[in-house]
Image (tube, rainbow, N blue to C red):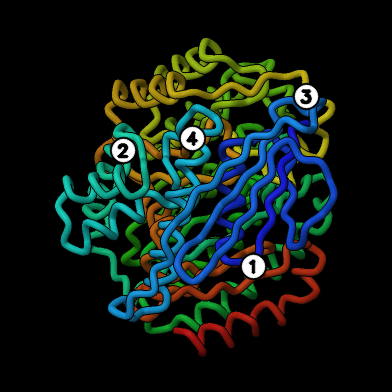
Amino acid sequence: MYKIGILFENREFEHDVYELIKAFYPEAEIHTLYEDDEAEYDLRFCVERDNENYFIKYDRKENPEIKETEIKGVASAEVITDSAVKDPHALRKENKDSIKYALYQLLVKLTGRTLPWGNLTGIRPAKLAMGMIESGMKNTEAAQEMREKYLVSPQKTALAITIANREREILKDIDYENGYSLYIGIPFCPSICLYCSFSSYPLKVWEKRSDEYVEALCKEVRETALMMKGRKLDTIYIGGGTPTTLLPHQIRKLLDTVGEAFGYEGLAEFTVEAGRPDSITREKLMAIREYPVTRISVNPQTMNQETLEIIGRKHTVDQTKEAFHLARELGFDNINMDLIVGLPGEDIHMVERTLEQIRELAPDSMTVHSLAVKRAARLNIFKEKYQEMSFENNQEIMDLTMKTAYEMEMGPYYLYRQKNMKGNFENVGYAKVDKAGIYNILIMEEKQPIIALGAGGSSKLVFDHGKRIERVENVKDVSNYISRIDEMIERKRTAIATWL
């Protein structure tokens, strides 16, 4: 295992430096240090600052067996203290951009390669592009800044600018100041996928308490509606987990409560992420059809049976097709399908096989995720078991997914990135005209409050004309959520009264 140490003289930009180095050395063991140590590292960075510059120094051993042979180098970035930059947040951002620019150039020199998203380590490149355009920049000017200041590749720059413009058009009638969106989480799944790091629990373990969960959730729904009275509800998104692990009578109870508490009139979008094909039945889809749901998902992730078995999805390719056709038969006219590229053992030919079958089904939108292995995922926890498997993602695969989306008359409409993404790529949502997921854009662009209900729900309270965001968290554990539901409600009440 390649071993890297990063010594920080202080904690300025610690996270950004770490993430950028991790992006160039994704498989390395990286140690963050705050005082010198005697350990041996294959590559060692030291981040220092004086009054005028940041310095990033490095020692790299050419051969770990020959300790005398080292390559030493340094990159520097100017400290910006200009009093003309009065806003401390703007000043900090300028310094962060400066140090990341210098560090990126150094890492390119050390590794001999570049990254498709340049020195951007955040998860919202389209938000950056949108901010530039909304500030008055022309598309060409925003593109130039992304290429020159953030060193983003021309291809990814074009993607970000395209998506930012489509997002602006989709959101043009959304009320940012007085509007909000609602997320309702169902934390159960038929089984837990190998790569999953969400707050999800096997349904078999919680089946006997699912009624209690729905009861607690309905209480939170009713109380939250009172808190948000007088504001405009724009979108509702029921996600998870897998919402269709609920039984038909539980689905009706929840959707009845949401309708009574919030009302369904005037919604721009109402999504139920049905998700796992092995949880979808005719009875459940018929229950959903009784309400003004405008959009659902049937998510295969892959159409290769051998991969489904490896990643722990206990359903078949045929079940995915059956669930999709059933939804069409029952009248759902806006169906999304989620795919993941970079899954264990899958090469471009297997991805092509998946895309061919998706093309035959002809969904209305398709979200392509690049595999991101987070700390909580079993794939990471049991990495020794899976170390023999290949995890392949490259620009050729990403180009193939885009080409297929265009062939299905879909264009990109939202984009985000995650930590530890294979190939340092992105997740992209593609949709036909008028079939884009509005909630997906709102959660990424942080234009209005997102009120999240259920175990693991994380509300984003966006205020001060979008300049400030405060989070309100619900506990993740289902038992704690049920027993502490009054506490969860009070957390929201206090935060909403304080910030909104």
**What mark, if any, has residue 159 been given in the picture?**
2
* Spatial separation of the CA atoms under disc 3 and disc 4: 27 Å
344 or 7, which is in the foreground? 7
Q: CA distance from mark 3 to mark 2?
A: 33 Å
Q: Amino acid at mark 4?
A: Val
Residue at 82% over, 54% down: 37
Side of 23 relative to 436 (left or right) = right
Classify the position of the N terminus by image quarter.
top right
Residue beneath disc 1: 10
Mark 2 Cα-neighbour bin, 10 Å: few <14, some 14–19, many ≥20: many
Q: Which mark is residue 217?
A: none
Residue under the point 74% across and 25% down: 63
Secondary structure type for disc 1: loop
**Residue wearing tag 4:** 108
Pick out the residue farthest to the front.
68
Q: Quadrant of the C terminus?
A: bottom left
